[in-house]
């Protein structure tokens, strides 16, 4: 039978010692995504419509989301974990879960940083487009970050509203 108090303490000790490393490893990919998305806008002289405080708050929300996702490691711990010293989970399962989670989180951090960068320079575009457009759905799709899908949907909506 398991000693749940010891098992829980062991799991919390293992994962919480690595949370700071996890958070620090997500900073460079998030900044990479942000700066690659804003580089062109800054180069052509676009004006930021969110500001430093707004960008900081968006990154704070993203960091909170990343830490909520990190907390799912406890569900893995209690599904696959064992308090036996010879268990595969304690020998290499935790490490594999940590590395896989960090790699996945880094990919999401690049995308999240990119979306924050695009949001910084596209909020004004959406407000200008919505004031010049009779169809609010077109303004919504102008605001969406991305290239192909949003423009295709904009074209479809504009053709439908022209009929």
Image (cartoon, rainbow, N blue to C red):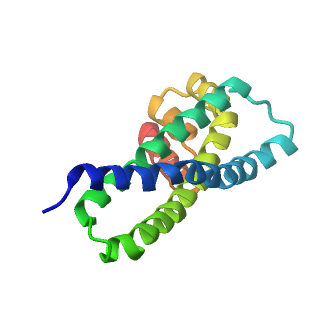
Question: In this view of the protein, which residue sits in the foreground, 13 or 155?
Answer: 13
- Establish if 128 lies above or below 154: above
Camera-side residue of 9 and 136: 9
Residue at 39 percent of width and 48 percent of height: 71
For the point 47% across and 63% down, the residue is 98
With respect to residue 139, does 146 lie above or below?
Answer: below
| x and y, in percent, of residue 88 in the image | 33, 77
Residue 31 visible, this orientation: yes
Pick the residue in front: 138 or 27.
27
Query: Which residue is painted at 80% across and 48% down in the image?
Result: 39
Query: Can residue 49 be seen at all in this image of the molecule?
Result: no
The quadrant in which residue 161 appears is: top left
Name which residue lies at 70% across and 53% down.
Answer: 28
Percent position (x, y) of residue 118? Answer: 65, 42
- Could you say where residue 9 lies in the image, as x and y percent from the top left? 34, 49
Q: In this view, does 2 lie above or below 123?
A: below
């Amino acid at each position: 039978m398991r000693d749940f108090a010891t098992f829980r303490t062991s799991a919390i000790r293992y994962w919480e010692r690595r949370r700071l490393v996890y958070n620090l490893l997500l900073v460079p990919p998030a900044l990479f995504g942000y700066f690659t998305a804003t580089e062109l806008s800054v180069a052509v002289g676009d004006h930021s419509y969110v500001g430093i405080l707004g960008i900081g708050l968006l990154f704070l929300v993203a960091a909170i989301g990343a830490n909520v996702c990190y907390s799912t490691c406890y569900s893995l711990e209690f599904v696959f974990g064992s308090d036996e010293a010879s268990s595969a989970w304690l020998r290499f399962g935790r490490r594999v879960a940590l590395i896989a989670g960090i790699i996945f989180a880094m990919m999401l951090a690049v995308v999240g940083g990119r979306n924050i960068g695009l949001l910084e320079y596209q909020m004004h575009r959406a407000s200008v487009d919505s004031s010049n457009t009779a169809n609010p759905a077109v303004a919504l799709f102008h605001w969406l970050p991305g290239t192909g899908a949003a423009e295709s949907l904009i074209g479809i909506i504009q053709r439908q509203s022209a009929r």
